[in-house]
Amino acid sequence: MATGDGDLWVFGYGSLMWEPGFDVIETRRARLDGFHRSFCMRSIHHRGTPERPGLVLALERMAGASCQGLAFRSPAAARPATLAYLRARELISAAYLEAELPVALEIGGEVRAVTFVMDTRHRQYCRLDLDAQARAIAGAVGGRGPNDAYLFNTVAHLHALGIPDPDLDALAEKVAALTGARDDPPVPGAIGSRAASG
């Protein structure tokens, strides 16, 4: 796929799908092979605190797995600002590792995209069953808001995009039961092939 010289692709699989926060000139559904989306990172800043950690999504390496998400193209002129923003947002506790990985675009072709994968050696890495994940998410709140809102927004956007994730659906049901949230999570607007900045 032809792009401007130096344009930056970014792969989003969690909150970046619904809140990229940087200049985006093209958005495409995409697939990253060899990783899966997992609530395997304890959040002590954005969606929890050191005293009451929440959980956030990370890409965890797994043979034979794949993760569907969104590939965002940011213009070359914005590359330094985009990378600085992403690093400040995602590398706050160094639990993610920045990587440039090949992602397959749904419309065809492949691009190399910056994304952030779990450092499984980091102390915030965890592997919990769905019940334990639900208990951690229910009631946790961090600098970017409630942990359950992060989960519900992610699930709503996956539904809007037609991306199945049965584990996240089951987790959302468990968290809703624990928190008494009976209303459906917010459904995002239609996601087109181009988006305004931020």
Image (cartoon, rainbow, N blue to C red):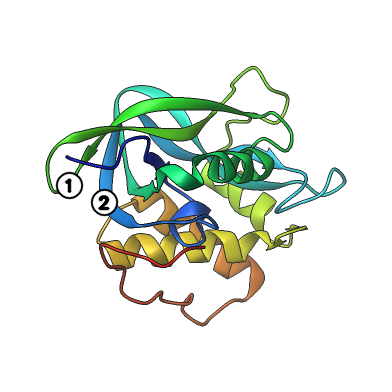
Does any portion of residue 173 appear in the rendered image? no
Give the amino acid type for the residue marked by disc 2 in the picture. Arg
Above or below: residue 4 compared with residue 140: above
Q: Position of residue 105 (x, y in %)?
A: 21, 42
Q: Residue at left 18%, top 40%?
A: 2
Q: Look at mark 2 in the image and give the residue it sits on.
A: 29
The quarter of the picture where the N terminus appears is top left
Report helix, strand or loop for mark 1.
Answer: loop
Q: Nearer the viewer, residue 147 or 14?
A: 14
Vertical position of residue 182 compared to residue 151: above or below: below
Foreground: 174 or 95? Answer: 95
Query: Between disc 2 and disc 1, whose residue precedes?
Result: 2
Identify whether 120 is placed above or below 38: above
Q: Residues within 10 Å of mark 1 (few under 14, many from 20)?
A: some
Q: Position of residue 94 (x, y in %)?
A: 69, 28
Residue type (three-letter) at the residue carrying disc 1: Glu
Is any atom of residue 98 visible in this view? yes
Whether the residues at callouts 2 and 1 have beta carbons within 8 Å, the answer is yes
Name the spot of residue 175 as percent of width and height, x first: 58, 62
Q: Residue at x 43, y 53 (%)?
A: 168
Residue at position x 82%, y 49% in the image: 49
Circle number at residue 129: none
Residue, disc 1? 106
Residue at left offset 26%, top offset 44%: 30
Instruction: Indicate the quadrant where residue 36 lies.
Output: top left
